[in-house]
Amino acid sequence: MSDAREAILKRMRTILSRPDLRFPPQQTEPLTHATRMVVTDAPGGYEELAQRFGEELEALHGSYEICETEAEARLALVSRLMAWIDQDQKERKGAVVVTGQEQSVLAWDPDLLPITGLDLTLADLGLTLVAPAELRTGEQRDRVRHIRYGITGVEAAMASTGSMLVISGKGANRSASLLPFRHIALIPFSRLYRTIEEWLAEQRAAGTLADLFHSRANLTLISGPSKSADIEMALTLGVHGPKFVHAI
């Protein structure tokens, strides 16, 4: 065996023997029909899952806040939104192009959002919640083209990877998480899962998985802001979607 090969194998053995690695487990139990080996996991209850999700999202250039009550979540959303608006106004340079959409927020139907009466809350701030039923024509798309802020819920949030599953449907237009420059995702604790495998298993057990995939036009896994890199791996955010993603 060559010295180079032996050095590589020795390095691999050394790395895999580290006790702090989540994978592979130090003591592997035999797999059963109900269990699957996954690359990463997130043990704990809702509080631990929320914290792990936030940490993973931050590693992906996103941000997060954990709120105990709906009232706290409402305040966090309003504070984040107003801070973003203030930041955008301060960063504007040169001539300002007025689009008529500066005070608009692209969102799901208010009844689908986990914070009740959000349209009224935004109206009190002088903002308009826009929830388009469809965006098939150029005229319909022009009405939301320049909206910089989006608010959605999620179908599921995976703590182990900081990823969010967003499913489009009636009242939940995919544009709200795709078009805006800044996206706020509202995640109830009940939508937190350890892994995507756990969510899939729950859907299979309920008999809803096949219908979900066949009846919805779009299912998207969002892992932080939109990212793109060139051949030298210079990372650019916000190329194909939001540059900022904040989870509450």
Image (spheres, rainbow, N blue to C red):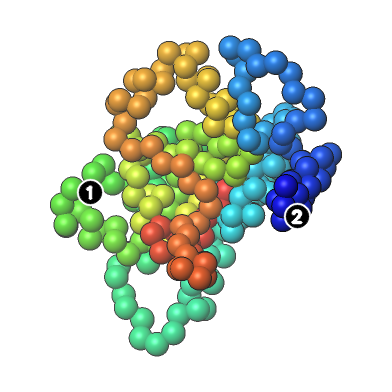
Picture mark count: 2
Residue at screen point 59% across, 54% down: 60
Amino acid, disc 2: Asp
**Viewer-proximal residue, 4 or 116?**
4
Q: Can the viewer see residue 76 in this picture?
A: no
Q: Report the side of 148 relative to 187 (left or right).
A: left
Amino acid, disc 1: Leu
Residue 237 vs 217, above or below: the answer is below
Residue 224 vs 90, above or below: the answer is above
Distance between mark 2 and mark 1 Cα atoms: 62 Å
Mark 2: secondary structure: helix
Q: Earlier in the sequence, mark 2 or mark 1?
A: 2
Residue at screen point 23% across, 44% down: 134
Residue 53 vs 146, above or below: the answer is above
Q: Which mark is residue 20?
A: none
Q: Report the side of 202 relative to 107 (left or right).
A: right
Q: Residue furthest right?
A: 19
Residue at screen point 53% across, 20% down: 201
Residue at screen point 71% across, 36% down: 23
Q: Residue furthest bottom?
A: 94
**Viewer-proximal residue, 181 or 229?**
229
Few, some or many residues within 10 Å of mark 2 (<14, 14–19, 20+): few
Between circles 2 and 1, the one closer to the viewer is 2
Mark 1: secondary structure: loop
Residue bearing mark 1: 135
Mark 2 in CB contact with mark 1 (< 8 angstroms) = no
Q: Measuring from the top left, give residue 209's x and y in whole percent.
A: 41, 21
Q: Measuring from the top left, give residue 71's x and y in whole percent.
A: 62, 42
Residue bearing mark 2: 3
Q: Report the side of 197 relative to 66 (left or right).
A: left
